[in-house]
Image: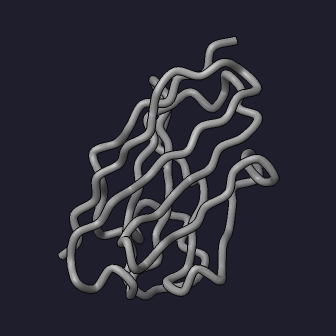
Amino acid sequence: QVQLVESGGGLVQAGGSLTLSCAASGRTFSSYAMGWFRQAPGKERDFVATVGWSALNTYYADSVKGRFAISRDNAKKTVYLQMNRLNAEDTAVYYCAAVLGGRWPSTSLDQYAYWGQGTQVTVSS
């Protein structure tokens, strides 16, 4: 069992940066690949980025590639999403999620077993 709590969301101007954190509980955090998803108002929840259990492997949606960076610290049981050059299209609720096993990269919602409650990111233009 893994419980996830996101933090770090807020209001930022276009072109700015923000770092999200996702703190996990549970002894087996390092066994899980972790992902970030986002959901804009009236839209489906979309994949953003994922990091493998060892932190060596990462994978990004094309829309954020080169601007966002996902990382994890297994000792702190925390996964991060560094977001740079933000624009209005990045406005959404951001969720972290955990997946155990399965194919890599895990980009589908139904692959993830555990979800956080989400944190709002609003980019003003």
Reply above or below: 124 against 73.
above
Residue 60 x/y as whole percent:
69, 60
Reply above or below: 125 against 49.
above
The coloring applied to the image is: one colour
Residue 124 x/y as whole percent:
63, 14
Quarter of the image where the N terminus is located: bottom left
Q: Residue furthest top?
A: 125
Which residue occupies 28% across, 59% down?
A: 4
Which residue occupies 57% across, 72% down?
A: 51
Which residue occupies 66% across, 72% down?
A: 58
Q: Quadrant of residue 18?
A: top right
**Nearer-the-camera pick, 48 or 43:** 48
Instruction: Please state if 64 lies on the left or on the right of 94 as rendered.
Output: right
Which residue occupies 63% across, 32% down?
A: 90
Residue 95 x/y as whole percent:
41, 48
Instruction: Please state if 3 lies on the left or on the right of 84 as rendered.
Output: left
Instruction: Please state if 27 lies on the left or on the right of 73 as rendered.
Output: left
Quarter of the image where the C terminus is located: top right
Q: Residue furthest front?
A: 75
Reply above or below: 93 against 64.
above
Residue 22 x/y as whole percent:
39, 56
Total marks drawn?
Answer: 0
Q: Quadrant of residue 110?
A: bottom left
